[in-house]
Amino acid sequence: MKWHTTTIQTPNGEQQAIAPLVISASRATDIPAFHSRWFMERLNAGYCVWVNPFNRSTKQYISFSQCKVIVFWSKNPSPFMQHLEEIADRGFQFYFQFTLNDYVVERLEPHVSSLESRIETFRKLSEMIGKEKVIWRFDPIILGESITVECILEKIRRLWQQLSQHTEKLVFSFAEVDCYKKVQNNLRKNNLYLRKPSSTEMIAIAEGIAKLNTVSTYPLVLASCAEKIDLSAYGIEHNKCMYDKLILRLCKGDSAIFNFYKRPEQQKLPVDLVNKPLTSARLKDPGQRRECGCIASKDIGAYGTCPHMCAYCYANPAETIVGSNMARLKAGSESLL
């Protein structure tokens, strides 16, 4: 994806920066939970720096000057909520991908806050910014040991009762345990023998979630994230975490967003006549998996900077490395690494 470029002023002089319309904050780490001060400092500075995780000598300057929408990813946005009014006053639209699982007994998320406090934060956030901007993720679904299909569905049912009136959408995915060696190592180190559900188990879970939706007082849009399996027979769509339809809904009438994401056949239509997603294949995020439906955005996070240390997470190395990365982060740092 080729974004607009601009020249920015930094302590080291002028630099060329990309100026994306949509920023992801972040798939790689929990910025709202752990890096709210850094984010607000960078917003005030007007730019940040992204460091390539596979080659740290490669850096990219990112300007906020053209940004219209920021998508926040978090398991605990509570420390960040005090800044939302200021972010809105600056003219940014935003929404949250709020991951709220219940793996308390299994201790798969050792450093997240209590389940009760996360549920309360979810409710408060929804009341503050609107439930359309708070997307519930049960992510990932993982099986093994005491975690059965029935157990997962019961966990989702209990959370549904408390969250469904505070959101419009539930997104879930199935753990890709076998794809990441660091995940396998983390699980073994913690004597956890967990796995991705089989195709049969995926179908059973999808059917169970669909049944929950059928009887719910507050039915939700259901979507699976970056999954090959087709669950449309159960009313479950393939998700777009970076979702053009929601972005257009938030940025109604914004010509920059419309012109960037429009389909060729819609070029001459006025914005207020277009009510459907505008993406084409060229706008798919090339940095994501083939099954991912996300439109292009620029992520500003960094691996190895999330102290949640979830056992299934592919983004974190050893806890000592995370601690070192966090200790190096100082006031005024342009990047998270």
Image (cartoon, helix red, strand yellow):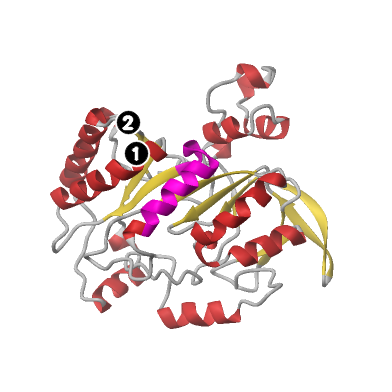
Q: Earlier in the sequence, mark 2 or mark 1?
A: 1
| Residue 53 quadrant | bottom right
Mark 2: secondary structure = loop
Point out residue 289 in the picture as x, y percentages from the top left corner.
44, 50
Closer to the camera in the image, 14 or 169 = 169
Vertical arrangement, residue 324 with respect to residue 9, above or below: below
Q: Is residue 160 magenta?
A: no
Q: Which residues are magenta?
A: 117-134
The relative height of residue 38 versus residue 284 in the rendered view (above or below) is below
- Using residue 160 as the reference point, say whether residue 273 is left or right of it: right
Residues at discs 2 and 1 in contact (Cβ within 8 Å): yes
Instruction: Measuring from the top left, give residue 307's x and y in whole percent.
Output: 45, 72
Q: Secondary structure at mark 1?
A: helix
Which residue in the structure is indicated by mark 1? Answer: 164
Q: Position of residue 315 (x, y in %)?
A: 44, 66
| Looking at the image, residue 203 lies above or below residue 14 | above
Amino acid type assigned to the residue bearing label 2 in the image = Pro
Of residues 45 and 233, the one drawn nearer to the viewer in this rendering? 45
Q: Which residue is mark 2?
A: 219
Q: Is 67 located above or below residue 221 in the figure?
A: below
Label 2, label 1: how far apart the Cα atoms are: 7 Å
Q: Magenta segment: does it hold 129?
A: yes
